[in-house]
Amino acid sequence: MENGLERAFGRLSPQPRQMTQPAARWRSTLITCVESGIVRVWRDNDKEASSDPLLELSVGPGVCRMRQDPAHPHLIATGGKENALKVWDLQGSEEPVFRAKNVRNDWLDLRVPIWDQDIQFLPESQKLVTCTGYHQVRVYDPASPQRRPVLEATYGEYPLTAMTLTPGANSVIVGNTHGQLAEIDLRQGRLLGCLKGLAGSVRGLQCHPSKPLLASCGLDRVLRVHRIRNPRGLEHKVYLKSQLNCLLLSGRDNWEDEPQEPQEPKKAPLEDTETDELWASLEAAAKRKLPDLERTQGALQTRRRKKQRPGSTSP
């Protein structure tokens, strides 16, 4: 089962989720973000390591997710609890290039709370999609005059915790705190289908870039691979003992076909070699002394027998 997973996905690396958000790379630098809302850009060079960051931004408290634009690595998006979606340009000013506006009040004229749990950039466009802790999926278009969502859909009754784009980026798969997975169409906002099998809160989702496969993990300690196209269903599952918070698909292919590096023969430590030589010399000395000791013991036994013979006189 594990070999099948590696052939289908490469290698999957569960990663712990901490207070700091997932890091990103840009121009030999490392981008980090913490829940308190501090984004820092660090040198990623050991020779020029410094305790001071190259850039520091304040994006607001309560950050739940920081996401980098794969097509434009200098752009990042942030969002969280009572922290609306923002897009930042690390090459520009300290102000966001896009700041989302909250949706209109509900039918009771009450303010709708904000809680963005995950963010994804849509390829070949400026649009972004978010999932919220209030079971909503929203699409934003920074090129549009309005800063509110251009599309909104809801799924279930529980908080959405993770999201991933499907191959083709026409839909997203979301997971919630009760182990439910669903595919949402981003063009019409309708439900395309559901996936079963999870028993705990979903914490990590990622689709294969070319195959109709989805990897998922969560607090039920199991890594699963689903087929997201007909026939939908569970392909593999592996119990990994610890509670899982995140996973990553490797970009390398054909792990089994790559030649392995020759391993150098292990050299015994110098102390072990000297100890072995010492014991060998002691064993050789013991073998040399053993015949002399046996001859001496044999002579003593002969003398004793002669003394015990009747009529024998002592010299």
Image (tube, rainbow, N blue to C red):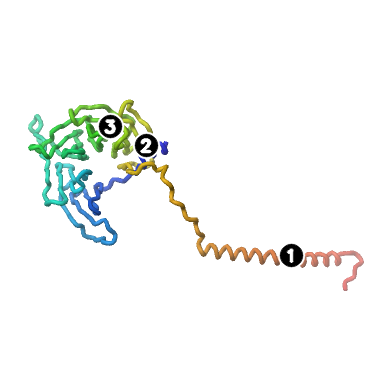
Q: Residue at image x 25%, y 54%?
A: 28
Q: Quadrant of residue 275?
A: bottom right
User: Nearest the camera: 250 or 239?
Assistant: 250
Q: Position of residue 271 (x, y in %)?
A: 52, 64
Q: Position of residue 164 (x, y in %)?
A: 25, 37
Residue topped by disc 3: 181
The answer to which of marks 1 and 3 sits earlier in the sequence is: 3
Horizontal arrangement in the rendering, residue 206 relative to residue 5 (left or right): left
Mark toward the viewer: 3 or 2: 2
Residue topped by disc 1: 291
Mark 2–mark 1 CB contact (< 8 Å)? no
Q: Quadrant of residue 124?
A: top left
Please state which amino acid type lies under the numbered disc 2.
Ala
| Above or below, 128 relative to 20 | above
The answer to which of marks 2 and 1 sits earlier in the sequence is: 2
| Mark 1 residue crowding within 10 angstroms, few (<14) / some (14–19) / many (20+) | few
| Mark 2 residue crowding within 10 angstroms, few (<14) / some (14–19) / many (20+) | some
User: Nearest the camera: 275 or 302?
Assistant: 275
Q: Circle 3 — which element?
A: strand
Q: Residue at image x 15%, y 47%?
A: 88
| Above or below, 307 relative to 137 | below
Identify the residue at the far bottom of this view. 315
Residue topped by disc 2: 8
